[in-house]
Image (spheres, rainbow, N blue to C red):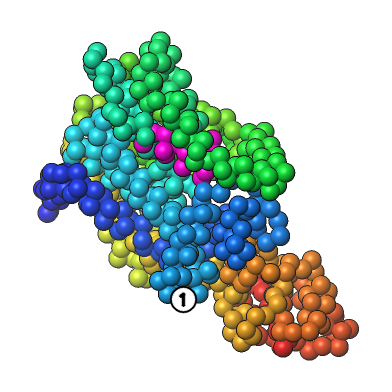
């Protein structure tokens, strides 16, 4: 059978011959991993369209200080991501993109750039630990990670936040390792600027999360070293001044505009609310992140788990100390907080990658250990289960089968099987490169073909298309029984939310071109209401679908009165 190892070796040697080659290779690899489905995937309720709609309203109103979703204040996160999304849409308008403010992929561009930056910065951070060839493999494994691929396709904060976290921790690693390796410690003059610049951006993106990650790591390392002198090389006084210069103008502006209401909502209600109880049905028990780790960090998760004994044995070495300080304290915090969302632990995954690679280069993963092969088999079992779920969903919801995805799925599963075989014969580096290839194939199959065929999940896009088909230049629209943010984003900021069918009937009675989207449960009272009002709206179409958030099937009738 043809071996891929010589191919992987040649690619690694060629790409790692210079940093420019490595960056170009990782850029192309990241785009291959993240672009399938990037433009065709519908707005994913509920967070993504909330972010996109708030950014759209900034463009509509010209107010780039306050953050609003329709008429409600959205005082949960700082303004950074909304500025980035607004800039992306403005660039799309300048380049002549058709109807740019309703193109969700434009709002996703900051996330795509953030995910690519996370991959490149992982390579840069790992250069503090490894040779360029091993660091290149680490960047490739991050590009292959399922969770980063998901966040690259969603218009919200977490991919950009991950890039900021890796930048700060890469700079912190250099300060720590340079200190522990040399008695004549001479700090890099640029390192502090990377550290504090990324911190300042992170504060504008999602508040204190990144400072929490490096802050907890710094506390652990200072206790371990019984000194904070190594951290002084990052020039904390100048760095804090830089952060204030970057973030203070907007914080002062939003404080003045809201009378301090932003901080009450974002810190008191959102952040502390997540600490006190699970918000928006996102509660999870401690240990949940460990349980889902094998899915979110697939395909390398199984091998990362096998690196734990190595990390424990070598836990007193400076490199291992730093990586454990990066991972463990923040992971404990995330597990302790009742609100659980998979992306919370994403900033810790580059450190997991580094631990895995340290185990690899030091022979710390024993393929003969009891259960090692069974653990490696998760590389095959996880995508097999995912393929089964996707096929079941296609058939159950739409009575279709994603035939075009089958050859890609089969090839991805074959490569995943070859991962296990490579591990069994002791070729761990070859197994990890095969992991990257398997992830690329699975990404193409899932995002490029399988999800695209799930029409039932595209309820909001189909309703927005039906609204446009009515032919009115600027219709007034009300929805009853279906209130997802994606519908607001796609149909317009002024979308009205009706309480019942009678409200929809009264809405249609008003003058002008009006459209009512009525869920089947409310149709009887809607028809009674229009009969009493003496109007005869036209039934444009009826659209069945499935609302993932509600977990139920819906059928929406589209009525128009011109």
Quadrant (top left, top right, bottom left, bottom right) of the C terminus: bottom right
Residue at image mark 1: 98
Residue 332 point in image, percent of width and height: 51, 28
Which is more toward the observer, 297 or 71?
A: 71
Q: In which quarter of the image is residue 137?
A: top left
Helix or strand or loop: what does disc 1 sit on?
loop
Residue 221: image quadrant is top left
Q: Is residue 37 above or below residue 475?
A: above
Decide which of 78, 250 is in the foreground and name it: 250
Q: Residue visible at 29% across and 24% down?
A: 187
Left or right of residue 88, residue 489 in this image: right
Magenta highlight on residue 171? no
Q: Position of residue 13 (x, y in %)?
A: 12, 44
Residue lying at 83% horizontally and 77% vertically, measured from the top left: 506
Please state the extent of the stretch shown in magenta in the rendering: 194-209
Identified at 36% across, 36% down, the residue is 194
Q: Within 10 angstroms of label 1, few (less than 14), some, or many (20 or more) residues?
A: few
Residue 342 in view, yes or no:
no
Report the predominant secondary structure element of the magenta stretch: helix
Position of 463 compared to 189: left or right?
A: right
Query: In front: 505, or 124?
Result: 124
Q: Can residue 139 be seen in this view?
A: yes
Identity of the residue drawn at 44% across and 47% down: 160
Is 396 rendered above or below residue 436? below
Is 203 within the magenta?
yes
For residue 458, above or below residue 277: below
Q: Can you say whether 302 is above or below 385 in the image?
A: above
**Residue 253: horizontal and vertical position, in percent?**
62, 46
């Amino acid at each position: 059978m043809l071996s891929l190892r010589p191919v992987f070796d040649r690619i690694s040697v060629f790409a790692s011959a210079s940093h420019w080659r490595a960056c170009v290779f990782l850029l192309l690899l990241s785009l291959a991993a993240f672009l399938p489905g990037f433009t065709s995937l519908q707005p994913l309720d509920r967070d993504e369209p909330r972010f996109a709609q708030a950014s759209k309203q900034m463009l509509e109103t010209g107010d780039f200080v306050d953050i609003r979703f329709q008429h409600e204040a959205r005082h949960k996160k700082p303004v950074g991501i909304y500025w980035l999304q607004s800039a992306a849409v403005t660039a799309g308008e300048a380049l002549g993109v058709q109807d740019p403010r309703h193109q969700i992929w434009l709002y996703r561009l900051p996330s795509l750039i953030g995910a690519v930056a996370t991959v490149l910065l992982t390579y840069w951070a790992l250069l503090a630990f490894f040779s360029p060839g091993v660091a290149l493999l680490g960047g490739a494994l991050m590009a292959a990670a399922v969770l980063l691929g998901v966040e690259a396709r969603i218009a919200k904060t977490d991919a950009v936040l991950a890039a900021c976290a890796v930048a700060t921790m890469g700079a912190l690693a250099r300060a720590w390792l340079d200190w522990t390796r040399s008695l004549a410690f001479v700090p890099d003059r640029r390192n502090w600027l990377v550290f504090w610049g990324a911190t300042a951006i992170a504060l504008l993106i999602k508040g204190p999360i990144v400072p929490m990650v490096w802050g907890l790591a710094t506390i652990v390392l200072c206790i371990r070293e019984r000194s904070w002198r190594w951290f002084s090389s990052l020039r904390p006084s100048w760095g804090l001044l830089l952060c204030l210069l970057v973030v203070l103008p907007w914080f002062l502006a939003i404080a003045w505009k809201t009378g301090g209401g932003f901080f009450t909502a974002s810190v008191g209600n959102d952040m502390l609310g997540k600490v006190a109880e699970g918000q928006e049905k996102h509660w999870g028990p401690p240990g949940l992140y460990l349980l889902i780790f094998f899915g979110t960090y697939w395909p390398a998760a199984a091998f990362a788990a096998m690196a734990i004994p190595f990390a424990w044995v070598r836990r007193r070495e400076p490199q291992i100390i730093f990586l454990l300080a990066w991972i463990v304290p923040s992971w404990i915090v995330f597990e302790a907080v009742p609100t659980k969302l998979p992306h919370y632990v994403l900033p810790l995954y580059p450190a997991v990658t580094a631990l895995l690679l340290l185990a690899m280069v030091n022979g710390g993963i024993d393929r003969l250990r009891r259960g090692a092969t069974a653990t490696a088999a998760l590389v095959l079992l996880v995508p097999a289960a995912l393929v089964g779920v996707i096929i079941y969903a296609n058939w159950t919801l739409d009575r279709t089968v994603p035939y075009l995805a089958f050859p890609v799925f089969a090839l991805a599963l074959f490569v995943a099987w070859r991962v296990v075989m490579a591990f069994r014969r002791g070729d761990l580096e070859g197994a990890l490169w095969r992991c990257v290839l398997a992830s690329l194939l699975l990404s193409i199959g899932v995002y490029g073909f399988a999800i695209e065929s799930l029409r039932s999940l595209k309820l909001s896009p189909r309703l927005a298309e039906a609204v446009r088909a009515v032919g009115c230049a600027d219709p007034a629209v009300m929805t009853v029984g279906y209130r997802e943010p994606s519908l607001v984003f796609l149909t317009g900021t002024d979308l009205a939310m009706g309480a019942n069918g009678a409200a929809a009937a009264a809405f249609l009675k008003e003058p002008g071109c009006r459209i009512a989207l009525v869920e089947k449960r409310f149709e009887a009272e809607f028809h009674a209401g229009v009969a009493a009002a003496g109007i005869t709206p036209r039934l444009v179409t009826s659209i069945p679908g499935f609302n993932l958030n509600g977990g139920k099937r819906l059928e929406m009738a589209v009525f128009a009165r011109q």
